[in-house]
Image: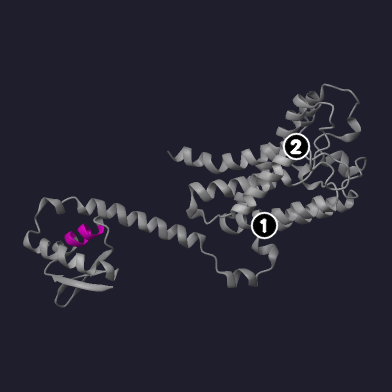
Amino acid sequence: MRQIGTLESAELAHRFTDYLVAEGTDAVCEQEDTGWVVWVRDENNLAAAKAQMREYLENPRDPRYDHASRIAGQVRAQRARQREEAARNWVDVRQRWRQPMARQIPVTMTLIVLSVVITLFTGSGTRFDGFLGRHLLLIDPSSQVPGETNATRRLVEILDHGQVCRIITPVFWHFGMMHLIFNMYMFYQVGGLIESRRGSLLLGGLVFLTAAAGNLGHYWTELVLAPDQNSLMLGGMSGVVYGLVGYVWIRGVVAPEDGLRLSRNIVVYIMIFLFIGFMGLTDGIGGTGSRVANWAHAWGLVSGMASAYLPMLWRR
């Protein structure tokens, strides 16, 4: 900081300091033996602030100084909020990496472990008739009837019986190791980013929201557009990944203070993958002959983007 001058009273010093702050100069005043000393933090503002102080001393009761206190208060409040946001987003990397991974991002790691275990116990997603197949997939595969058109009624009946978890649990079921590895890598990158920056509770809520939106959105969209395409065989974390990417993407635009950033390459990549998925070029990519749940990707992406932007509208 650089000193620009001394004033004889607290009233004059605070009045002038408020004026400087309101004009965009970061300034403070302090009491010393010789009086109240005014300082500016940025040396580049030194000459201008000294000139303003000379003008002020000629007529300290000029009306232009009257409203400076209110404006300065608003400026200082905004700066305080920015410092709080910066402190909340600051991460001590040295302390973070001394902790076990499960403590750094516990929700992310727990969901990855569940996905790996379930995929292994279901033979890479091929054992539909086992206990896990009957209880984790959106619709029990053993209850499917070829040619049945009232699948919506069966889903409602399942939900009425309290099996709401079926809306979420298909995300742990992966069709092949390539499907699992790709989804877990992306989920670790994006989910870990959100959890480390914004907390485990937010990540858990986003996973629940994007999983439900992706699974149900895909299921009913497929029933309308392609009821004969085995839309009940739905699994994988990719709808959630799309949702989390959508969330980080939008928050990086509307609330950069959150500290959430994605490289443009990742956003471009997932949009290209979504496009070629709807073109049918990714079907069977996991080696099981399964169709990619493109509508789960799309609905997950939309739900993630909406959950990032809607709170901004609520504040307005």
The quadrant in which the N terminus is found is bottom left
Secondary structure, mark 1, is: helix
Q: CA distance from mark 1 to mark 2?
A: 27 Å
- Judged left or right of residue 41, residue 249 is right
Q: Nearer the viewer, residue 18 or 289?
A: 289
> From the viewer's perspective, is residue 171 above or below residue 258?
above
Label 1 vs 2, first from the N-terminus: 1
Q: Nearer the viewer, mark 1 or mark 2?
A: 2
According to the picture, the residue beneath numbered tag 1 turns out to be 189
According to the picture, the residue beneath numbered tag 2 turns out to be 279
Residue found at x 79% / y 23%: 153
Residue 78 within the segment the image draws in magenta = no
Q: Nearer the viewer, residue 97 or 218?
A: 218
Tell me where residue 71 appears, x and y as whole percent.
Answer: 25, 51
Q: Residues within 10 Å of mark 1 (few under 14, many from 20)?
A: some
| Residue at the farthest left position | 58
Residue found at x 90% / y 45%: 126
> From the viewer's perspective, is residue 111 above or below residue 218?
below
Residue 16 within the segment the image draws in magenta = yes
Specify start and end residues of the magenta stretch as a single range: 15-21
Secondary structure, mark 2, is: loop
Residue found at x 80% / y 38%: 234
- Judged left or right of residue 304, residue 284 is right
- The image quadrant of residue 190 is bottom right
